[in-house]
Image (cartoon, rainbow, N blue to C red):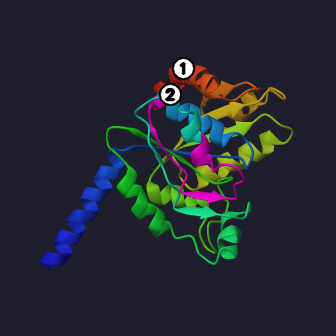
């Protein structure tokens, strides 16, 4: 009985600690929409820590290595991946090829070791919100397990209204705490329509970036901080 009470007390303390943490999960409408660049800008702007627990496929650098190379503030930490998979595919398939299965419990354990109560913690997810991580769990299940707030990334391209609103609908159905949208690129101005139909705030917009280097990240981070802080 005493052991049960003590165990319950420890879980309550852990839950309380996690709820104090400003964990922000970066997800969006799919892959190749700018999540990593926006994660870098947010990490720089908030002097946050960054973590991408699941990396599926990489060539020259992983997303974590690239982000480490463009950050200039001295406070941010970039934590290593829990799963560094070789195949550029859906994580559940990439993991299967590597002979492993992604465990949300393993990711959660690493999360509790990385987070700090006095800093923002940026987590970048793989692909979109319904991407499978294993045979029975998706990215959205990881978000719920981490009790994270979500920023949705949408890129202006033909079809983005449909993809964005489908993403928003799933978030509402699953009671995900969405802070709002960050838009990027300049194909067409779909942003007002997506905000209106989804009911989620527009947090910030980033135009088409030709050269993405340290100077660009710093300049965009300064603008981003002013735009996003009122919503955090």
Could you say where residue 123 lies in the image, as x and y percent from the top left? 52, 47
Compare residues 166 and 90 and report the one nearer the observer.
90
Q: Which residue is mark 2?
A: 45
Examine the image and state in which quarter residue 12 appears.
Answer: bottom left
What segment is highlighted magenta in the picture?
46-66
Residue 142 x %, y %: 53, 60
Q: Quadrant of residue 150 in the image?
A: top right
The residue under the point 47% across, 26% down is: 229
Residue at image position (84%, 42%) is 159
Residue placed furthest toward the left: 2
User: Residue 203: image x %, image y %?
Assistant: 59, 29
In this rendering, position of residue 180 left or right of residue 96 = left
What is the CA distance from the residue labelled 1 to the residue labelled 2?
Answer: 6 Å
Nearer to us in this view, 108 or 197: 108
Q: Secondary structure at mark 1?
A: helix
Q: Which mark is residue 222?
A: 1
For image coordinates 57% across by 37% down, the residue present is 69
Disc 2 crowd, CA 10 A, few/some/many (<14, 14-19, 20+) = many
Specify few, some or many for label 1: CA neighbours under 10 Å numbering under 14, 14-19, or 20 or more: some
**Quick check: 209 above or below 67?**
above
- Name the residue: 78% across, 30% down: 190
Sequence order check: which comes first, mark 1 or mark 2? 2
Locate residue 228, reporting x and y percent: 52, 27
């Amino acid at each position: 009985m005493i052991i049960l009470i003590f165990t319950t007390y420890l879980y309550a303390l852990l839950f309380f600690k996690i709820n104090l943490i400003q964990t922000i999960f970066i997800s969006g409408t799919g892959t190749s929409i700018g999540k990593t660049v926006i994660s870098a800008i947010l990490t720089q702007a908030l002097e946050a820590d960054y973590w991408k627990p699941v990396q599926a496929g990489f060539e020259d650098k992983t997303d974590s290595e690239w982000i480490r190379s463009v950050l200039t503030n001295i406070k941010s930490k970039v934590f290593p991946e829990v799963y560094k998979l070789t195949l550029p595919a859906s994580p559940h398939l990439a993991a299967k090829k590597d002979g492993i299965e992604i465990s949300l419990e393993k990711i959660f354990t690493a999360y509790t070791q990385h987070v700090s109560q006095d800093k923002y913690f940026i987590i970048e997810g793989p692909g979109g919100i319904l991407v499978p991580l294993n045979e029975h769990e998706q990215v959205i299940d990881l978000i719920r397990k981490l009790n994270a707030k979500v920023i949705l990334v949408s890129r202006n391209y033909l079809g983005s209204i449909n993809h964005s609103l489908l993403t928003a609908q799933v978030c509402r159905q699953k009671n995900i705490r969405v802070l709002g949208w960050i838009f990027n690129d300049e194909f067409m101005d779909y942003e007002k329509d997506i905000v209106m139909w989804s009911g989620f705030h527009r947090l910030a917009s980033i135009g088409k970036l030709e050269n993405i280097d340290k100077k660009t990240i710093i300049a965009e981070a300064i603008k981003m901080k002013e735009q996003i802080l009122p919503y955090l």
